Amino acid sequence: MKNNEIWIGNDHGGYELKVKVMEYLQKKGIACKDAGCASQDIVRYPYYAATVAGAVSKGTISRGILICSTGIGMSIIANKYKGVRASLCTSTYMGKMTRAHNNSNLLCLGGKITGENEALDILDAWLTTEYESGRHDISLGLIEEAEQVICNPKGWNPEVK
């Protein structure tokens, strides 16, 4: 059974936004765990991304949030983990659509490129939007199929349909 607590990982560039995100979640009564760095001192984001993405991949938690300066580096490493659908969102619409169509389980935000209010709006859309299922299951099934073999020495060679 997955834990509904949301883990939040960040590096130095995401520290200030992480603090605001955690306050927001706590005010909403959503359990969260700080899995990031505790200051603006320079650290390496892959370590924090690995903690949160690894927990999602292993099924320890259902969803997580990663924050670095742009969100790009965090999203790159997080999507290396099987079963992780990390989405870098810079608008509320993206936050909504990544849940509705991609069943995103990891939200990536840019602490230096997205303002606090916009980031919290994105977060709210991501938290409250349900996965639509239906036709989107086909694409998610293909992603799961690819994950089964991408690390296999034979690779993945899909037929374009």
Image (spheres, helix red, strand yellow):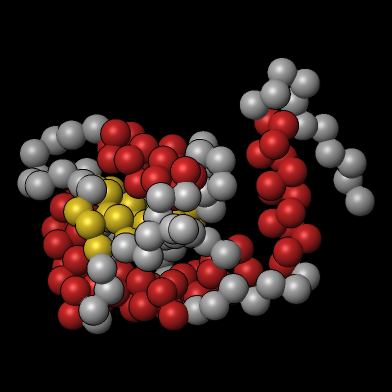
| For residue 7, above or below residue 44 | below
Report x, y in % for residue 48. Answer: 28, 40
Instruction: Name the residue at 47% across, 50% down.
Output: 59
Report x, y in % for residue 38. Answer: 10, 47
- Dividing the picture into quarters, in which one does residue 102 lie? bottom right
| Foreground residue among 145 and 13 | 145
Report x, y in % for residue 116. Answer: 22, 70
| For residue 27, above or below residue 151 | below
**Which residue of the protein is positioned furthest toward the front in this rendering?**
1
Instruction: Name the residue at 77% across, 70% down.
Output: 135
For residue 138, say whether it is visible: yes
In screen coordinates, is 71 left or right of 158?
left
Number of disc labels: 0
Instruction: Name the residue at 52% across, 48% down.
Output: 84
Report x, y in % for residue 140. Answer: 69, 56
Instruction: Name the residue at 75% across, 73% down.
Output: 134
| Foreground residue among 105 and 97 | 105
- Dividing the picture into quarters, in which one does residue 147 lie? top right
For residue 74, say whether it is visible: no
In screen coordinates, is 89 left or right of 131?
left
